[in-house]
Image: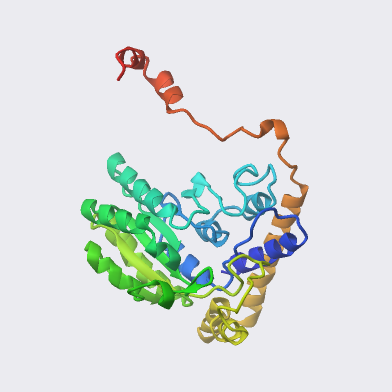
Amino acid sequence: MLRIRRFEEEGMRYFKDSQVPGWFHSSAGQEAAIVGACLALRDDDGMTGTHRSHGHPIGKGARLDALMAELMGKEGGICKGRGGSMHFADNSVGIISESGIVGGGIPLATGCAFSARVRGVDQVTLCFFGDGAVNQGTFHESLNMASLWKLPVIYHCENNGYAQTTSVAQSHGQPDIALRATGYGMPGITVDGQNVSAVYEAAAPAVTRARAGEGPTLIVANTYRFEEHNFGLVIPGEPYRSVEEVEAHRRERDPILLYRAVLLEEGVNENSLRAIEDEVAEAVQQAVQFALASPMPRPETLSDYMFNSPLQTITASWPGWRGINQHGN
């Protein structure tokens, strides 16, 4: 959780210095909802994220240096600088995609889970999305399909209370999001998204259930984002949430401070916690230095890594495709 927080703090600093192009959607405040769920996974399990997805790959185990370089659009980035803030992907740790489209990762996660079923493996897929995505058609279509076919997917809603500036109460006819699972014949669980242990305790049985072929689960982690929808973006008009509301969450519901208190109560001493904090600070600074030193992609390589033709794979592995193709099939 601390790695995510410090990574994003540095990312926001360099965004303000115009070294991070595009948008920056911070997940500060939502770290427990991320880490608790990712802890239940194996490295080879799949994961999809959202536009607010700097934390998800860190929770899944991706390299900080390549993530920071990607934020800055550098060649050393996890996607060679082609993806940027909203499109991290790292197949080495199962991150198949993140998407700037609200709800865009939900059908991709469902397809990833279907792939595991077709391949006969016991991999599961964890699908992150926000409360705003629950009202998208992709949510309903995907959950219905996953339930019918008992696909190994965990739908994990990070309910931070606001779809940009619109509250759940204003946009959901049924504001208890977990109840929607009943309509698709799957378990629906609501959990305190600021409590990393509680999130893990909800996610671990859902992963076990999916891996055993018993189908999907919907988990709703009630969390809170400390920053604006887009970091640095001034939203005109009346504020949709008060300064007092935000500060109360920072003071009383910060998942890192809450878990630090738990560790102290369980007997972990201050020196050990400071050692963790120093180690994380050093790792993030090394990631920043790697990113700053990494070159920008050359303009002539603009289209590199952008396309893949299935026909190339078929041609290489199965010469008989030509006969089928001549008959128009």
Q: Is residue 309 above or below residue 197?
A: above
Q: Is residue 114 above or below residue 246?
A: above
User: Considering depth in this image, is 33 or 36 the residue closer to the camera?
Assistant: 33
Query: Which residue appears at 59% of the width and 75% of the height?
Result: 226
User: Considering depth in this image, is 144 or 270 the residue closer to the camera?
Assistant: 144
Residue 60 % position (x, y): 50, 57
Number of numbered discs present?
0
Query: Which residue appears at 67% of the width and 70% of the height?
Result: 234
Q: Is residue 192 visible?
A: no
Q: Is residue 109 visible?
A: yes
Q: Is residue 82 above or below residue 23?
A: above
User: Considering depth in this image, is 261 or 110 the residue closer to the camera?
Assistant: 110
Residue 194 % position (x, y): 48, 77
Residue 176 % position (x, y): 34, 76
Judge left or right: residue 129 versus residue 86: left
Which image quarter is the N terminus in?
bottom right
Residue, far front: 237
Residue 319 falls in image quadrant = top left
Which image quarter is the C terminus in?
top left
Residue 182 falls in image quadrant = bottom left
